[in-house]
Amino acid sequence: MRTLIAALAATTLLTGTAQAHMIMPLDRATILVNAPFDFKVELDKVHPESEIAVTVNGKPYAEVFGKPAAYVAEEKDKDDKVLGSALILRDLALATPGDYTVTVTAGGAEKTVTWTVYGTPEAPKAKNIIFLLGDGLSVAHRTSARIMSKGMADGKANGRLAMDDLDHMAFIGTSSTHSIATNSANTMSAYMTGHKSRVNALGVYADRTPASLDDPKVETIAEALRRTGKKSIGIVSTAELEDATPAALVAHTRKRADKAEIVGMFYDVQPDVVLGGGSAYFLKSDIPGSKRKDDKDYIQLFRDAGYSIATTKAELAATAGSNSGKVLGLFHTGNMDTWLDRNQLKKGTAEKFPDQPGLVDMTQAALDQLSKNPEGFFLMVEAASVDKMSHPMDWERAVLETIEFDHAVAVARDFAAKNPDTMIVVTGDHTHGISLIGTIDEDRPGTGRDKVGVYDEAGFPNYTDADGDGYPDRVDVSRHLAIFASNFPDYYETWGPKLDGPFEPAVKTETGEYVANEAYNVPGATLRIGNLPKDNDTAVHAVDDVVLQATGPGAEGFKGYMEQSDVYRVLAETFALGAAK
C-alpha cells in the first residue's frame, strides 16, 4: 500500500496536478531584487478572511511584505460561478536577496511555495545588449539557411552564417506553466520578465478570473530599464508591433489578442525606437484601416511625445537626422511582407505597401538612433515570419526569413566589433517540427514523392547567388531543398516553392473543421491526411529545446540547459539591474 501511495504522489509531482490553493508567483520563481510584482493567493473555496493565514519564512506576511493584501470574498468565472476567495497585493517589491518561503493555510488546506530573490553585481558587464530572436527558429531553419545562402560542396558548407560563430551556447526549455507546449506570448514573456507563464499570457501570471487585464503582473525588462537608469530601448519586428514577441517588452495581459490595449502599454513605457507593422491598432477608429474601437489616435500621441514618424523605407532613412532619438516606424497595417515577396515575387501585399524596409534596414536604423545615448541601450530584433511562414509550411519563405535574420545578426556583430561593450544574444522563442531530409529534383522521373532524393541520392541543391547579396537568385531551381513538418492538418503537398503567394494549406468548413485547400490540388500534388486535430489549420509549434547563442561581456552566463526564465537573470546581471542605487 505504501508503495502505491508513493507512486501516486510521484505521479502528482511529475504531472503538475493542481493544488487546493494557488500562490502567485509560483513555486521556484526567481525574482530580481526591488522589481515590482503582484502577489496573489487563490483559495480553493470561499473562506472568511479571519480563517486565512499567510506566513513568509515563518513570519506574518504583512510584516515581511510591509503591507497587507486586499481580501476578495468571492471570485467568479465567466458564468458567474463562485470559484473561491482570494488575496491580492499589487506592486510588491523585495529589497533583500534570499529565499522566501510563503505558506498559505485556510480551511485545513495548506500550500507552500519558495521564491528566490536575487541581486546582481554592482557594476554592469556591458553597456548595450542586442537581443535577436527568430520566431520559431529551429535547427533545420539554420541548416537550410546556410545551405541555401552559402552552398555546399564535398560535404562542407561553402560559407558560414553570422550566427554560426557566436562563442557561447545553451539549450533553452520553452514549456509554459500549464503545459509542455507553448506559444510566442509566454515564451518571449519568460525571456523578458524572468517569469514563466501560461500560453497566450504576457507579463502576468494567468489567474482564474475571466478578465484579461487584471492578472498578477511582473516587471518587464523595458520597465526595469526605465526604473533603474537612463538606457534607451529599441523594439524591431517584422510582425505587428502588438504581436506577442514585441509586446512582451511592455505588455501585461492574459490574452495576447488584446492588441488595442497593448498599444496603450507601448505608449506607457515609450521605448525610444519602435519599428514594425501593425499601424491598424495605432489609428483611431474613424480612419480607414483602423482596428480600434475608440477615438484614441496613438500616432498623434507618439508624435506629441517627440517621436519622428515613418511609414516607408524612405521615411525611415530620413529619421537618421532626428535629434530626439525617438522613432516610431509603422510600415504596414498588419504583418510586414516576407523577404521573398518584397524582393522577388511581389506577392502577398507587397504591391499595396511597396516601400517596406527589411529587417536589416530596421536593425541598422535602430542601432543608429539608440547608439546616440551615452548610457547605452537594449535592442530587441524579431524575425517574425520565420514562424509565420513555418506554420503554413511555406518553407522557402521561412528559410529566406532566416537568411534575412542572419543578415541582421551580421549588422549586430559589426556594431559590436566597433563597440565591444555590447552583448549579442541570438535565439528563438520556440521551435517548429521542421526537418530538412534531402532535395527535390525536378529532373528526376516521376511525380511528387518520386522526385525526393534522400541519402546518397539527395546530392546538393543548385541555388545560385550571382549578385553576391547572400540570398539565392531564385527559389524555383531544379534541385531544391526537401523540407517537411512532423505535424500538419489535411493539405495538398505540392513538392515545390509557393510562387503564387504565401501558402494556405487548409480552409475552414461550415462545421468549423479544417480541410485541405483544394486550390492546391494541382497535377502532381499529394493529399496528406493530417495528424493534428481538425480545428488546426496549420502546423503547430514543437516542444524541442531552442538553441541560444551569445557573445560579448556577460555571454558567459549562457551555458548548458536553461529555462527561458533563467535567460532574464543573465540579462539583468549583465546590466546590473539589481545594483544598489
Image (cartoon, rainbow, N blue to C red):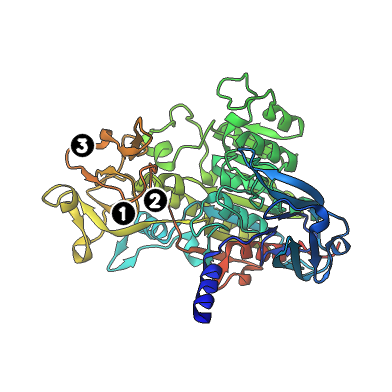
Q: Which mark is residue 399?
A: 2
> Which of the two residues, 538 or 86, is positioned nearer the viewer here?
86
> Which of the two residues, 86 or 280, is positioned nearer the viewer here?
86
User: Total of numbered circles in the picture?
Assistant: 3
The residue carrying pointer 3 sits among few (fewer than 14), some (14 to 19) or many (20 or more) residues within 10 Å by Cα, namely few
Q: Is residue 216 visible?
A: no
Q: Decide if residue 410 is on the left or right side of residue 150.
A: right
Q: Looking at the image, is 28 positioned above or below residue 75? A: below
Residue 449, horizontal then vertical, whole percent: 18, 52
Q: Earlier in the sequence, mark 1 or mark 2?
A: 2
For label 1, the SS is strand
For label 3, the SS is loop
Residue denoted by label 1 = 483
Question: Label 3 to label 2, Cα distance in Å?
Answer: 24 Å
Residue denoted by label 3 = 522
> Which of the two residues, 484 or 322, is positioned nearer the viewer here?
484
Residue sitting at x 55%, y 57%: 176
Question: Label 1 to label 2, Cα distance in Å?
Answer: 10 Å
Residue 136, horizontal then vertical, whole percent: 47, 53
Q: Looking at the image, is 190 positioned above or below residue 246? A: below
Residue sitting at x 67%, y 59%: 21
Q: Amino acid at mark 3?
A: Val
Q: Decide if residue 165 is on the left or right side of residue 145.
A: right
Q: Quadrant of the C terminus?
A: bottom right
